[in-house]
Image (tube, rainbow, N blue to C red):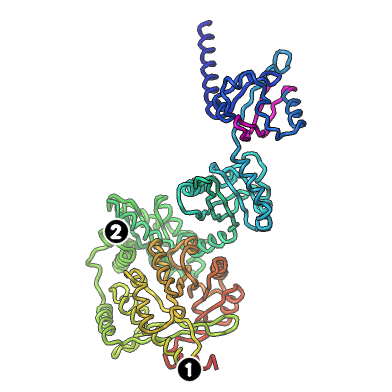
Amino acid sequence: MVEQQVSLNEEVLRELRDVKYALDQSSIVAMTDQRGVILYANEQFCKISQYSLEELIGQNHRILNSSYHSAPFFKEMWKTIGSGETWKGEIRNQAKDGSYYWVDTTIVPFLNEQGKPYQYVSIRNDITLQKQMEADIRKSEEKYRLITENSSDLIVTLDSNMNVLYCSPSSIQFLGKRLEGEAKTNLLDWIHLEDHKHFSEGISVMSGKESQSTALEFRIQQKSGQYIDAEAKLNSIYNEQEKSEYFLLVIRDVTARKKNERLIYQLAYHDTLTELPNRRFFIDRLRKEVQNHKHSQLQLAVLYIDVDKYKYINDSYGHEVGDLALIEVAKRIRQCLRSSDIVARIGGDEFTILLTSLSSKTEVETVSQRIIESFRDPVEIGERMVELSCSVGISLFPSDGNSVDELLKRADISLYTVKAQGGNNFLFFHSDMEERSLERILLENELRKAIQQEQFYIEYQPKKNIETGALMGMEALIRWNHPELGRIAPNKFIPIAEETGLIIPLGEWVLREGCKQNKKWQKQGHTPLTLSVNLSTRQFSQPNLAEKIKSILDETELNAKWLELEVTESIMIDLENTVKTLQEIRDLGVHISIDDFGTGYSSFSYIKHLPVDTLKIDASFIRDIHVNKESLAIVKGIVDIAQALNMNVIAEGIESQEQLNRLSEQGCSQGQGFLFSQPLSNNEFEDYLNSQFN
């Protein structure tokens, strides 16, 4: 028993020594008797005070008095510790060389058996830099007071540990409380846990980089407990050694904008009936997975699913029953998949599935068979029992294609092969399935001839100010008039041109001819207007694109400010090179517009970083804007984002006064469509110009 007690005592002593060591390493520690005579001082104490241990021991603590604090200050301190209570506060002391330093101080009294203090232990932490910052801020406060106190943004200064040194009065409106003045308030305590790493990395990067500012996005908590979305500009404040020592943040509440972005994303990337991802979402994910799997030995599979005889269900039972059947189909397909797999409704009764990280074809067969079997039980809708079956076409990466288009196309070919064989089965793609049609061969051959023989011409569709009706510009639209086949629709020959690469010479011809015609109208005395020309994805990926555009502008003598190039969101996949190319074009003075906005693959958070002037709302959202609340919400969200980012916004495909009224109500400033004018030939557009400006 005695040995156990000795062992226990030794363990306690070891722990006390460890605690003392840790305390000595991190804090300034001293011990005095009840009169304030120093009995013990650690190395940190000697270092900050510049006195040796021999000089301190036996001296009254008044040796460090800086004469900064008043007599009542010390009287209150002695009253507190003399009564046996712990005292905490900030004290300015004077070092041996006469310099001053600040310490955050805690004094703990040790009591005898009668409860009277017989000695005191003081634990101090150096806060000189913090106090210096506070003093500096106070000195400059008057100069910047009006700015900070009247700013709706939250202005905060932090030390390298993210402790709040200063915050503007707007924190009361911003967070519901004042951060400044709270002891050791750390901004991370108010930032969402999931954003801690991102925020800390931003601070860390700024500490070691030459650039003086960067942008951060994070969620910050209000006093109520609710989180708001915030966007902050982070600047470094350097000391005399040019080291980043403090940080200034200007924080803005972007909750409304983020809400709009999330709403648009949900509406634009999900099917409202089944709540599955839609075609846009699926293609975006497929594109990313194809890129990821190019560096892997694993396969991925695309499954194209069609509900057999769905038209018969709609015709026999009505669209309501048909919709309920689709909801059940979506549910059954989901139950057949892993949590990592993606299923999307891409339109009507068609669904697509993306299976990733596959090691064998057998895994795909198992999933496909499971889906086929899941359809065997009839769907109960009300009092009806609806019989269902499905057909599945499958393509594999990389054996059946290395791109999104190839994989979808070949899965689709497989699907229709299954359906031609009676359906209710699945098939993998095989090269024998892919037979090019006579029309396709003819069009490709004729397209090559047409470029050489210049069988193309351009029509111009006016763009107008929605509020005033003023003509703002025109879009150049390519047309093909074949000498034997007549007019061929753009949606038939442009996809072939894209796939074969013929879109590059074709697009260059449109750009040159459009610029030439625009300059001709200006020389005739017509009011200068902006010409919009579509730039395909393949054109955009050309090397030295900006140089080619400049060459055409020089050749046609058209000022760059009268040219706008429309690009689609699909170019956003390679964001770094996209920004570089767009900036090179914009540096020429050419305007940039994102065509078909809301239907592509870009993240809304990217838009603010792009050198873009205009967002063009796709016609699919305009078509039913006057009757569909979802389309109206998407349009409103896009307009709000454009206005927040100081961009123009234009709607295409306006065909009725009702659509125009809804767009005007949402703040959309420009539009084009058949309500204003159909596309016009050179001569027709010239007459249109005369009628508009005369």
Where is mark 2, residue-wise?
396
Chief secondary structure of the magenta span? strand
- Residue 305 in which image quadrant: bottom left
Q: Please identify the quadrant where the C terminus is shown.
A: bottom right
Q: Position of residue 311 (x, y in %)?
A: 42, 70
Seen in the picture, residue 110 relative to 308 is either above or below; the reply is above
**Residue at 58% across / 54% down in the picture?**
250
* Mark 1 residue crowding within 10 angstroms, few (<14) / some (14–19) / many (20+): few
Q: Residue 226: where, in percent of width, then height?
A: 62, 50
- In the rendered image, is residue 316 in sight? no
Which residue in the structure is indicated by mark 1? Answer: 687
Residue at the image position 38 percent from the left and 83 percent from the top: 478
- Checking the image for residue 9, the label placed there is none
Q: Label 1 to label 2, Cα distance in Å?
A: 55 Å
Question: What kind of element bears circle 2?
Answer: strand
- In this picture, which residue range is highlighted in magenta? 82-109
* SS at badge 1: helix
